[in-house]
Image (cartoon, rainbow, N blue to C red):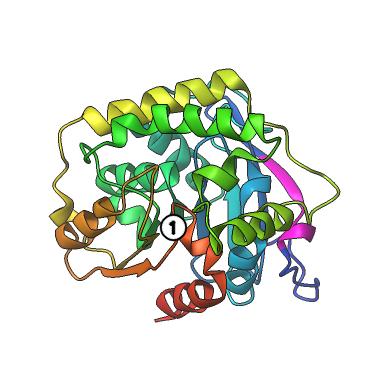
Amino acid sequence: MNAHFASNETIITSYKDAPARTITAGGVTYAYRELGPRGGIPVVFFVHLAANLDNWDPRIVDPIAKGHHVITFDNRGLGASSGQVPDSVEAMADDAATFIKALGFEQIDIFSFSLGGMVAQALVAKYPGLVRKLILTGTGPAGGKDIDKVAGVTYFDILRATLTRSDPKEFLFFNRNASGRPAARAFVNRLKERTRDRDVPVTLKAFGTQLKAIAKWGRSAPQDLSKITQPTLIANGDNDRMVPSVLSTDLHRRIKGSELIIYPDSGHGGIFQFHQKFAPVAVAFLDR
């Protein structure tokens, strides 16, 4: 599948320069970006609620792309991808599997954040052979405590952000304190580093459907996570208001042999606030 890459092609390891590509499968055209050296098991990034390709922190992507083939994508109905967003996490996982198989991969590593982590869990449950290693950040299990309240928290923080003319992520992902505020601003600024070929904004309709899917996931029966035998790295901040931090501990307890990192004095975006610490840990985990 990667025969079209000449061996002397310059390897792009900076996310802001990653070319925008598309592939059509199952009647859906998926928008994606890829970077890093080809060959080996690719790391596919599963993004969060209301996010498109421009929402990945380059300080997390770039260190991983130094030694790994990294792929970020817009799932069905998001950003520049066609179709309608499905109203269940399981259907989102089916679409992700369709996209991965269309690229010709038989096995991948997953880096996931928030809603992306829910989709990743659903994918592993249905297509266990497709995933070699799993990174779950800022996320929680099906039936997890208070996941169905995400919508309320989200709308409240969007309102707060609108009133202060700031990015909702500054409220949703970070503590509003002396360490959180500057980290939030730095994160939001990093997301603007790519200046050309920006992605299409996520529509309000797509966002609403995603919230419904998250609420459904929160109210559904717990899955048997002991079936996850893949090496798993779990990370979060200690004060996640969106997907409560206790759910990361819950995942760690239920996924045998998993590793857990909880960053102090940080929220849902703890891995972005502590990117200098977290990125090397993620790279080491993938390299092992």
- Compared across the picture, whether 67 is left or right of 143 comes to right
Does the magenta-highlighted stretch encompass residue 60? Answer: no
Image quarter of residue 89 = top left
Image quarter of residue 9 = bottom right
Q: Nearer the viewer, residue 29 or 205?
A: 205
Q: Nearer the viewer, residue 15 or 207?
A: 207
In this picture, which residue range is highlighted in magenta? 15-22
Q: The N terminus is located in which quarter?
A: bottom right
Q: Nearer the viewer, residue 154 or 92?
A: 154
Q: The C terminus is located in which quarter?
A: bottom left
Residue ranking furthest to the front: 178
Q: Is residue 141 above or below residue 136?
A: above
- Name the residue beneath numbered marker 1: 110
Image location (x, y in percent) of residue 2: 65, 60
Image location (x, y in percent) of residue 161: 61, 35
In the rendered structure, which amino acid carries the disc numbered 1? Answer: Ile
